[in-house]
Image (cartoon, rainbow, N blue to C red):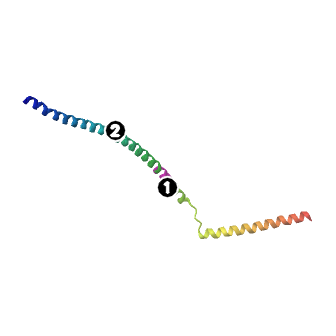
Amino acid sequence: MAAQIGQDETIPYTSDMWKKLMRKEDNSSSLINDFGALQRNYNELRASLEFSQAKMEDLSRSNSALQTEIEAIEKNKFVPTENMSAKIVYINENLTAQRAAFFKKVCNKGSLLQG
């Protein structure tokens, strides 16, 4: 009977061990699935980061080129001074006078041809 008591005592122990083993197997499967999902997320994030870095490099190169163009424009830009403004006014007035004289000559020739 003592042997039988010993066997009866091992049955609950074996059952508990089996439950614990099954729980560990479930947890392991869950961890493996989670690891796979994390690895996929990592790969997606890495690809996104590489794309973003490439885009930033393109934007940086484009920005540098634009800055070079702006510097060239600023270096060569034309800013009229007060003296130049006076010369522009003089040229415009002179052109107006020359136009008036030209139209006067044209009108005089026209009237000579008619008369």
The majority secondary structure of the magenta stretch comes to helix
Please, which residue is most extreme toward the front here? 1
Label 2 – label 1 distance at C-alpha:
46 Å
Figure disc tally = 2
Magenta stretch encompasses residue 61 = yes
Magenta stretch encompasses residue 113 = no
| Res. 40 image quadrant | top left
Q: Mark 2 highlights which residue? A: 36
The N terminus - image quarter: top left
Of tags 2 and 1, which is closer to the observer? 2
Left or right: where 115 falls relative to 6: right
What's the residue at 8%, 29% (across, down)? 3
Element marked by disc 1: helix
Q: Position of residue 65 (x, y in %)?
A: 50, 51
Q: Residues within 10 Å of mark 2 (few under 14, many from 20)?
A: few
User: What is the magenta range?
Assistant: 60-68
For badge 2, the amino acid type reads Gly
What's the residue at 10%, 29% (across, down)? 4
Q: Mark 1 highlights which residue? A: 67
Left or right: where 78 falls relative to 17: right
Q: From the viewer's perspective, is residue 59 above or below residue 91?
A: above
Please give the label number shown on residue 96. none
Q: Position of residue 62 (x, y in %)?
A: 49, 50
Element marked by disc 2: helix
What's the residue at 69%, 67% (across, down)? 91
| Res. 14 image quadrant | top left
